[in-house]
Image: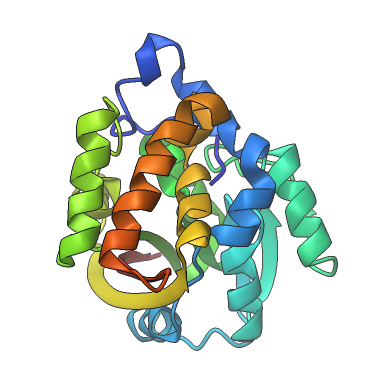
Amino acid sequence: MTDSGRHPAAPADEPDGLASSADFARSFDTVASQYATARPGYPPALFDAVEEIGGRALGGLRTVDVGAGTGIATRLLRERGADVLAVEPGPGMAAELRRALPGVPLVRGIGDALPLADGSADLVTYAQSWHWTDPARSVPEALRVLRSGGALALWWNVPDPDVEWTAAQEDRLRERLPGYHRHGISAEAPQILAGLGLRPVHRRLHWTRRIPVDLHLTHLASRSYFAVLGPERSAPVLADERELLLRTFPDGIVDDAYALDLTIVRA
């Protein structure tokens, strides 16, 4: 998560009409610890694809990770050899990032107005965060910051719609929680970028992690929709999900399945 701007395709409906789009964007600071603990990372195949499509190895690339959150993608980019600068507006998320990655330079800012010099980066990344920006502002900002030959990479883990239990859970949550996950921005990003005169390349990957059911529920609770609902209103939904999940995974270990949507444009 991060940027406080709201993409036009972000959730149009708020829980009981009480929460604004800004509330959704700010909500991650209230669940920063859960986010750091339970959110999935990204498989090596993602970074292989970023290198392939971007046309350059990550090693040594000056990389700006926008909406860095607690540093999940930042850490993995560093492990691939990238020279990473994290950009994060939320104080709670930034504090988690500083604890986890004390050696990473971190600036407070948003994608719609990057506090960076022209032509100062080889790669600008958004991991689970571009939907909080206004593309009419964040895309020109990324292109301004990128050097010639650089790349803008956007990616999202989404519950894999091709996996039966995952699709069923998402259907239940959409039915029970009005406005839940209605944006679908991960699939829409290529069209949005093409509409801005760019030539995006899109790739969908699939991967799975095996985690305890309670960690999966902690992950659900870290999503902006649940964070805005608050613990008291979220608890019954999560309790019902726990019961249903244990019917599918009686050993208490969930095969947490994701489709990973990656979109890249070259500068």
| 228 lies left or right of 165 | right
Q: Residue at x 33, y 80 (%)?
A: 53
- In the drawing, does residue 95 fall left or right of residue 195? right
Q: Position of residue 175 (x, y in %)?
A: 19, 32
Q: Please name whichever residue, 190 or 238, is drawn nearer the observer in this view of the structure.
A: 238
Q: How many badges with numbers are in the image?
A: 0
Horizontal side, residue 28 vs residue 258: left or right: right
Residue 220 locus on image (x, y percent): 45, 48
Q: Residue at x 31, y 29 (%)?
A: 8
Residue closer to the observer: 251 or 89: 251
Q: Is residue 185 visible?
A: yes
Measured from the top left, where is residue 207 in percent x and y? 33, 77
- Residue 109's x, y, as percent? 67, 41
In the rendered image, which quarter is residue 247 located in? bottom left
Q: Colour scheme used in the picture?
A: rainbow
| Above or below: residue 85 compared with residue 112 | below
Q: Residue visible at 45% across and 62% down?
A: 213
**The residue positioned farthest toward the top in the image shown:** 17
> Looking at this view, is 247 or 79 the one in front?
247
Left or right: 76 in relation to 156 = right
- Depth check: give the residue in front, 82 or 151: 82
Residue at horizontal 50 percent and vertical 88 percent from the top: 57
Does the rendering let one see residue 197?
no
Q: Quadrant of the C terminus?
A: bottom left
In the depicted structure, whether residue 120 falls above or below residue 222: below
Q: Is residue 147 above or below residue 175?
A: below
